[in-house]
């Protein structure tokens, strides 16, 4: 379940703007979702291979070039589906815990 929520949060961040992986980690950390590079990079690669994400290289002034990730058109559609699923799940859990 955590993997699915993490994927949803990452895609939502990337809907707002292109991001470098360490920026994604920082944004998640601000929301109290602790993620390490060893978790993030394989997830980004899987989403890229599935056509949900794409990236571009940007030269860095202080080191090697950086990959900036963004949603593809397929990724935008997938995020809409995830948001709908999240809403349904959230509503079901709330109904259950109110009983």
Image (tube, grey):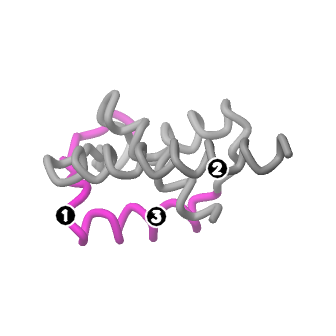
Q: Residues within 10 Å of mark 1 (few under 14, many from 20)?
A: some
Please tell me which of labels 2 and 1 falls first in the chain. 1
Total numbered circles:
3
Q: In this figure, which residue is indicated by the disc labeled 2?
A: 92
- Confirm or deny contact between disc 2 and disc 1 (CB under 8 A): no
- Confirm or deny contact between disc 1 and disc 3 (CB under 8 A): no
Task: Farthest residue to the front: give it.
Answer: 99
Q: CA distance from mark 2 to mark 1?
A: 30 Å
Q: Is residue 48 left or right of residue 73?
A: right
Q: In this figure, which residue is indicated by the disc labeled 3?
A: 41
- Which residue is found at the position 52% from the left and 48% from the top? 88
Instruction: Kindly state the secondary structure of the residue where label 3 is placed.
Output: helix
What are the residue bounds of the magenta stretch?
36-62
Residue 61 at x, y percent in the picture = 32, 33
Q: Nearer the viewer, mark 2 or mark 1?
A: 2
- Which residue is found at the position 33% from the left and 51% from the top? 81
Residue 23 at x, y percent in the picture = 49, 37
């Amino acid at each position: 379940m955590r993997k699915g929520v993490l994927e949803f949060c990452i895609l939502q961040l990337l809907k707002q703007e292109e991001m470098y992986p360490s920026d994604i980690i920082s944004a998640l950390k601000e929301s109290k979702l602790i993620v390490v590079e060893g978790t993030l990079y394989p997830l980004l690669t899987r989403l890229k291979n599935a056509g949900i994400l794409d990236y571009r290289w940007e030269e860095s002034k202080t080191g090697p070039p950086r990959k900036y990730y963004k949603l593809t058109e397929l990724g935008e559609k997938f995020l809409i589906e995830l948001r709908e699923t999240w809403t349904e799940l959230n509503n079901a859990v709330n109904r259950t815990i109110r009983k």
